[in-house]
Image (cartoon, rainbow, N blue to C red):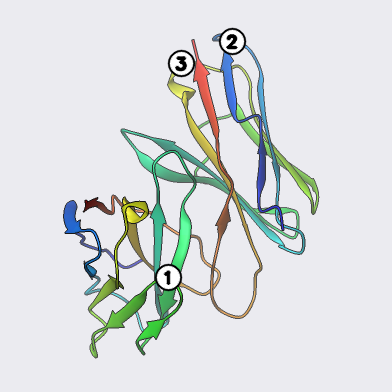
Amino acid sequence: DAGVIQSPRHEVTEMGQEVTLRCKPISGHNSLFWYRQTMMRGLELLIYFNNNVPIDDSGMPEDRFSAKMPNASFSTLKIQPSEPRDSAVYFCASRTSGGGTDTQYFGPGTRLTVL
Amino acid sequence: DAKTTQPTSMDCAEGRAANLPCNHSTISGNEYVYWYRQIHSQGPQYIIHGLKNNETNEMASLIITEDRKSSTLILPHATLRDTAVYYCIPQEGNEKLTFGTGTRLTIIP
């Protein structure tokens, strides 16, 4: 199993540009999570999906952020327009729901730098 | 969600057992205790979880007190690769995980 795959691994962009981060969850997992990690705020949940449906997006910072999951094997997190304060490492995680327990598998992350 | 208290940092000699405590005195009856770790520049990694009984897997052991107000993660023979931030997370069912600040464990050669 390849695990959770994220791309790109590193992204450097200029303020105002659109940024799209991509995630491929583990095959068979039906929940997907997007997290952001910074030194100041630690690891924060932005949004999560169950069966491709967004369940909780209360962590999404503002309207500049949007996430989609068009099918069970792909999700995107888009920032438009990007700002320097969006610089962070963005992680995607997936899990199998049900059974009353939660074990999430994280990808390697995308390090975003907005100049 | 239950609040947790973990030491900010700990050191452990290589080859010795690393014991990481976590206080979760407000944990509810249905909340499991999950432990994850994050090695530098990597995504968090699941270690172990438990509800009431002690648990052991290939990575670690989890000791939960009878009143469930605290737990201890034990790495029996710590190696340099165990240097990481360790997170203790009470969580119920399929709710989302809430990561705190964790314990930064440094294994000393």
Mark 3 Cα within 10 Å, few/some/many (few <14, many 20+)? some
Image location of residue A37, percent across then percent down: 43, 38
Position of the N terminus of chain B, as image quadrant, is: bottom left
Q: Name the residue that disc number 1 marks.
A: B59
Image marks 1 and 3: residues in contact by CB distance under 8 Å: no
Image location of residue A109, percent across then percent down: 55, 38
Q: In which quarter of the image is residue B22?
A: bottom left
Image marks 1 and 2: residues in contact by CB distance under 8 Å: no
Image marks 3 and 2: residues in contact by CB distance under 8 Å: no
In the rendered structure, which amino acid carries the disc numbered 2? Gly
Disc 2 sits on a residue from what chain? A
Q: In which quarter of the image is residue A19?
A: top right
Q: Can residue A37 be seen in this view?
A: yes
Depth check, mark 1 against mark 2: the one in front is 1
Disc 1 and disc 3: Cα gap in Å? Answer: 39 Å
Disc 3 and disc 2: Cα gap in Å? Answer: 9 Å
| Viewer-proximal residue among B87 and A99 | B87
x 53%, y 36%: residue: A90
Q: Can residue B21 be seen in this view?
A: no
Q: Do labels 1 and 3 share a chain?
A: no
Q: Name the residue that disc number 2 marks.
A: A16
